[in-house]
Amino acid sequence: MAEIIDGKALATQVLARTAEDVAQMIAAGAGAPGLAVILVGNDPASEVYVGRKIAQCRKAGIRSIEHRLPADTPQEQVLALIDALNADEEVHGILVQLPLPRHIDAALVLDRIDPGKDVDGFHPVNVGRLSTGTGGLVPCTPLGVMMLLDSVIDDYRGLKVVVIGKSNIVGKPVSMLLLEREATVTVTHIETRDLPDVARKADIIVAAAGAPHLVRGYWVKPGAVVIDVGISRVTDHDGVTRIVGDCATHELDHAKAVTPVPGGVGPMTIACLLSNTVLAAKMRAMKG
Ligand SMILES: Nc1nc2c(c(=O)[nH]1)N[C@@H](CN(C=O)c1ccc(C(=O)N[C@@H](CCC(=O)O)C(=O)O)cc1)CN2
């Protein structure tokens, strides 16, 4: 039977450590870190994630500053808000919830955030730092993936990793982090030929394609570790909607360890956002 890696439990530990860090900062007279959260529009899933982020900030002692804007907010107004938040000394982290409405150029918006406040790690400066292994803020989901992997793997050197999906948010950054650990990384995508054969050679699979139950049992080598980043809502024949991942987890008994969906990578994303906010506040204090 494969070990189920409990992302909820690990996220609780990360959040507890973050709350301790915040308490220490406050005790030292530095003040609580501040996270500005921008949500444009009313995408139901984004509303839920933003709500959870703000609730966790409150628990950890991080000040959250909410900016909820209507779906038709002009791009210039979003950019002006980011300029104001960049200049605000009380704001240590800025988060723009994705996806943005179609009329807004997400790349332009993300590029406008001060790299030192970019707690999502999406700014080109942080992307560049990650790819050169020179520090910076690391995207939350890949950071969470690495923490989950670290709970079952000590040494990545020479291990074969197959990353399924080449997104800027997960596939590419997680590949960089794994390369830093000296794993042999293959990044696959929609055009990859013979994907099941490629996946079957892997010691670690990171599935981030957003395709429900794409990874079947026969794709996975016995003893491999499988991290499921996908989160899709599917409706059964009986009309019940469920959240499922990219992996057919019920076929993975022969794996060494797997993450569940829900309760795997998702909770880690939010926990890592909070730890990144504390890191950004500490980096700013050191600079100051
Ligand atoms: N600015 C950002 N936008 C988005 C990011 C991001 O990292 N930064 N990631 C996703 C959404 N996301 C956080 O924002 C996120 C997704 C899922 C979960 C989560 O806990 N999921 C649960 C299951 C889903 C549910 O209960 O509704 C789980 O896996 O257990 C947290 C955060 C896109 N946008």
Image (cartoon, rainbow, N blue to C red):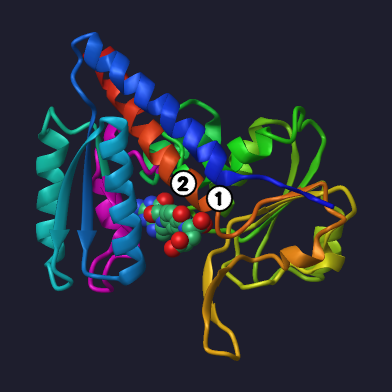
Which residue is pictured at 38% across the width and 37% down the height?
125
Identified at 30% across, 55% down, the residue is: 50
The single residue placed furthest to the right in the displayed view is 222
Q: Position of residue 8 (x, y in %)?
A: 53, 45
Instruction: Name the residue beneath numbered marker 1.
Output: 265
Nearer to me, 29 or 131? 29
**Which residue is identified by label 2?**
269
**Marks 1 and 2 close (CB-CB < 8 Å):** yes
Against 168, residue 44 (above or below) is below
The kind of residue on which mark 2 rests is Thr
Q: Position of residue 194 (x, y in %)?
A: 82, 70
Asked where in the image residue 72 lies, by quadrant, the reply is bottom left
Residue 280 is drawn in which quadrant?
top left
Q: Amino acid at mark 1?
A: Val
- Dot 1 falls on a residue whose secondary structure is helix
Which portion, as a residue range, is magenta? 95-121
Is label 2's Cβ within 8 Å of ligand 1?
yes
Left/right of residue 142 with respect to residue 228 in the rendered view: left
Magenta stretch containing residue 174, yes or no?
Answer: no
Spatial distance from mark 1 to mark 2, Cα to Cα? 6 Å
The residue lying toward the viewer, choosing from 36 and 263, is 263
